[in-house]
Image: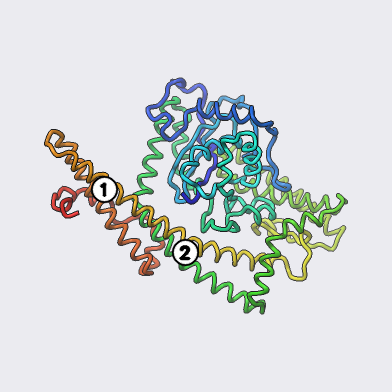
Amino acid sequence: MHAVSVDGNRKLYRFKNASGSATKGLFDGTFLARDEEVSSFVAQIQQATKHTPGKGMCGSSQWTAAKEHSGKSASKIDEEGLEIAVCRHGVLLRALNMFRGEIYAYPLYLQKELSPSNVSFFCSDVACKYYPYLEKVSNKCSELQGLLEMHPLLSVMHAKAHSWTCELKWGGRNQEGAGNTIGEEVEQVNSFLSRAAISTKYMSKGGRTDMLTVLAMGWNKKKMSNMDKILAQRYAKAVQRVADDKLKLEELKAELRIDDAVIQQWVTEVQHWPEANSSLEGEASREVILKKKIEGLYLSVMQRKHRLYRQTDSNKRRHKLRQKIAEEKAALSSAIEELREQTDIILPAVDELLLTENFVWSWTYLGPTDLRTKKAIFDQVMVIRRMQEEEQIVVQEMRRHLNSLIGVAGSLKTLLLDQSNGAHCGYHSMLRRRLSVVNAQVHHTKASFSLALHGEMTSQDMLSEDREEQVSDVEDTSDDDNDIDSS
């Protein structure tokens, strides 16, 4: 498996006073991990390591999900939400109930559970803080040292709300071998599962577990039935993006009148910006304090705007967030004005500043060329490299998906041969029907992959999201014995 993305969903909580709270569901441990196993693991980790209380900081920015330890909530809520793991195509893999907020031990448990799948990248919203925590834990718990082989990846959109040095070091666009892995795939799943939050928060413990598991099974069934088209579209888009982005880079080279040697030099400089910036930090004068204050307020407002609708499910909580955003924007405006009076540094107005994702501050690095120009060239080069990697990654995923379907068909044929007598006619008929459906999927998958690899997919095919041919159509015509015999 190439990448796994992990994130929390605070909307799927459950009240303590819900009826039948002590009952377990029929699907307990199937999709949602058993609470006692998770609690035992968390206690083991916290006993082995000296945890640091409080929220994690990224530069001047504070993240609620970046915590090593958190106490049990004293509210009327039992389960405070879910921690969910998905693959880079959005297929649900595993989840667990959160009882102590989004602490590091929860994604660590999911990472341990998924480690047998040979995951290359582990994506998180706070990878910059989680990976040092993983290193500390693995030093105390030798059985977890194998998890360090998974490369950390900071999700692309959340990286915009981190410090710029963090985005350069940990961001998904800058990780070699990551391809077009976004790291935000859980957000799509959260928007689907959160629809059930209005009812699951009043359910019993077992009823909520079964409801969420059934929803996950339905989501995965739809994803897997469309996986051939998803991979074909992804490959075709990657090929198109490489051509388009190379053209954009050539236009930038012509506009700036630079060659490949200069581009490589700028890319190297940008990659070393975090180290250069740390060496330029001096004594904390009033000017330095103002600069740090501006950076912190900018990041804080960006974070609050990002989670305004993602982590809140009530107008009351959103109103409080909007009030805090207004207060911080006023403080940011005052700090910018004070810095302008003390120095010759001129920054954009607050609203214009907040429209710029991952703003590069003029005082972070000294160089002869404009910082934004170098960063723009760097970003363009990174996009081209990631898309070139994406082509190779998707081809490997195509091969694995097709081999998986062929393997399922082979297993079904073996089961059919074992059912030689007529004692289980119903089971025999069901196997034949299923084999016909799988053979049709193999045929359709080969056709989709062939069109994508030979560049014959149209732009409409690349943009479409829904499959026109439903498996149910195949099943209705799958009773013909000749189709099975010929396969």
Tell which circle, 2 or 1, labels the residue nearer the N-terminal end: 2
Q: Position of residue 474 (x, y in %)?
A: 23, 51
Q: Nearer the viewer, residue 396 or 254?
A: 396
The quadrant in which residue 205 appears is: top left
Q: Nearer the viewer, residue 314 or 243?
A: 243
Q: Position of residue 184 (x, y in %)?
A: 53, 49
Q: Position of residue 107 (x, y in %)?
A: 55, 38
Q: Residue furthest left?
A: 422
Which residue was labeled with disc 2?
238
Q: Dot 2, crowdedness within 10 Å: few (<14), some or many (≥20)?
A: many
Q: Residue at x 47, y 44 (%)?
A: 86
Q: Residue at x 56, y 72 (%)?
A: 248
Q: Nearer the viewer, residue 310 or 73?
A: 73
The quadrant in which residue 455 appears is: bottom left
Q: Is residue 314 visible?
A: no
Q: Nearer the viewer, mark 2 or mark 1?
A: 1
Horizontal arrangement in the rendering, residue 392 relative to residue 174 (left or right): left
Q: Residue at x 66, y 43 (%)?
A: 132
Rendered-image quadrant of the C terminus: bottom left
Q: Dot 1 lies on which element? A: helix
Disc number placed over residue 391 in the picture, else none? none
Q: Nearer the viewer, residue 103 or 4?
A: 4
Q: Is residue 423 visible?
A: yes
Q: Amino acid at mark 1?
A: Gly
Which residue was labeled with disc 1?
410
Horizontal arrangement in the rendering, residue 295 relative to residue 99 (left or right): right
Residue 119 vertical placement versus 142 (above, below)? below
Horizontal arrangement in the rendering, residue 291 relative to residue 315 (left or right): right
